[in-house]
Amino acid sequence: MSISGSMYAGISGLTVHSQAMSVIGNNLANSSTIGYKSATTQFEDVFYSTVSTANGLNQVGHGATVSSIYQNFAQGSYESSTSDTAVAIGGNGFFMVNNPTTGSRYYTRAGNFEFDQYGYLVDAHGYRVQGWKAAEKTSSAGVVQTQGALTDLRLTSYQSPPSATSKISLSVNLDKTDDDNSTNTANPFFAMFSEWDGSDDTPIGDSKYAYQTTITVYDEAGTGHELTVYFDRVSDPAVTSQAGGYQVWEYIVTCDPTSDGRTVDGQKVGTTSAAGLLMAGTITFNSSGIMQGMTAFTLGDGATGDLKDLNSWTPAEFSDNGYPVFTANFSGSPNANFTTDANAKTIELNLGLQNDGTGWNGATANAAALGNDFTSLFNVAQPDLQAGASTAYDSASSTYDQNQNGYATGYLQGISVDRDGVVSGQYSNGRIINLFVLALADFNNPQGLILQGGNLYSEGSDSGSARIGRANTSSYGSISANTLEQSNVDMSTEMVRLITTQRGYQANSKVITTADTMLQEAINLKR
């Protein structure tokens, strides 16, 4: 190898070490960049010349070149964030974003996302995050399902629409030592019913019942209405003499008479004494206070004249869940006045006894037919006592659980993201709605991705096509919410590389200056 050849070898050394220094400088410059992946410069030797020596043929190298700049995709540390839409990937995968102007797709580990003024979830460049819309229902395993194709994630509404109440569940204890506050010799099972006067400012006096509990329900417009259920013990001698130790309680389900929107036989129920009376019936307990049976009556669709006439109150219909239903028609809708009407918004009442069969067992034609005969009290066809059913123990009357499934209009108050990438909205009405599912992309060879700047990568010929899937499945990592992935640059490692690269550069420059000196000596031989 000639002296000039050694100079060119030294020049190649300067070149590769200067490139390595650029990579190190870029790493250090991005040591605080979210989602940045450090790089390492790898060298290789270049071609060789064959020379003849006393030992035979040997080879002399001609320097070095950069073989590759290796991307280190190791996991970066987590950094907490106060942003609800800040997310990080733990494990394999990249978030997907789309340039809305060009339609180009990019991949990133930087999850510093936010909603823009149009409701799109975007990155720092305004590129739209990709994923799927969440379906309303989950799978049997509780996995949130998706609907439609991969798309830009967009929040189209900041409201949760209202939903009318269709279910009420009450678990009460009724004090078995309470008195019978409302009495009616002819119809003891409907004494409170008889006392109720919806046309009066005080429909029922405080002394006419043993216990009451109130729950707020919602109509289809999301307006709240208070429903009050009154309970009173039935202690009429004609009943107790036949009861054989069983206890009977009567109950009525009521609403504010002014919110009763039913129209029956041309009469606005809200203007009559029956205003606000939605359901009436009985509950039977054994001597231990365990619920054994119940009856339920609602205003029948053939009612005329006096709407409090017990002959017009017929056995209630059942919901598909096996509980008796009633309606108040709060909105005054047509063809929605009886539970059998096509437009009726029915509400089921669950006091703890479910009907596993169909209809009632031995039901009377109407409420009047019960009279004062304990043996006339019928029951659901196949009673199934539920956990937490109402009781009649020797302790103060109380409500130990009540709930309903309606809600008013809600307004978005917060966003959360779970480890599966499901983005949910928390609303002011207590609803939590699954909105989107973040998509992740993975590659056979992430080293083949093309760096685009701005924490973005694009597919390259060597990366292979993106494999798109959901977080926390297969080879894809999980999502960490309120978190950002820090740069994975190791400062100490980079400083060591900085020193060794500097020394390598110095050594190669020394090769050039030394070769230059040798050439100078050769030139001086001519003197």
Image: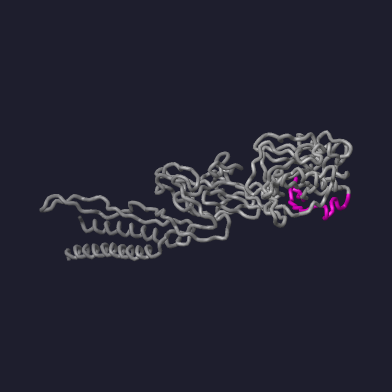
Give the vertical position of 373 relative to 214 (above or below): above
Decide if residue 85 is on the left or right side of residue 523. right
- Asked if residue 321 shows in the view, the reply is no
Q: Observer-nearest residue: 402 or 283?
A: 283
Q: Position of residue 191 (x, y in %)?
A: 83, 46
Q: Is residue 377 placed above or below 396 in the rendered structure? A: above
Query: Is 384 covered by the magenta stretch?
Result: no
Q: Position of residue 238 (x, y in %)?
A: 80, 44
Where's the C terminus, which quadrant? bottom left
Give the residues in magenta.
Answer: 200-229
Residue 207 in magenta? yes
Please tell me which residue is depicted at 57% across the width and 60% down the height of the picture: 82
Front residue of 461 and 340 = 340
Residue 444 relative to residue 141: left or right: left
State the residue lying farthest toward the left: 54
Q: Is residue 381 visible?
A: yes
Q: Is residue 450 above or below residue 344?
A: below
Quarter the N terminus occupies: bottom left
| Residue at x 67%, y 37% (from the top left corner) | 320
Q: Splitting the image into 4 quarters, where does residue 375 fall? A: top right
Q: Residue at x 73, y 34 (%)?
A: 362
* Front-lying residue, 19 or 426: 426
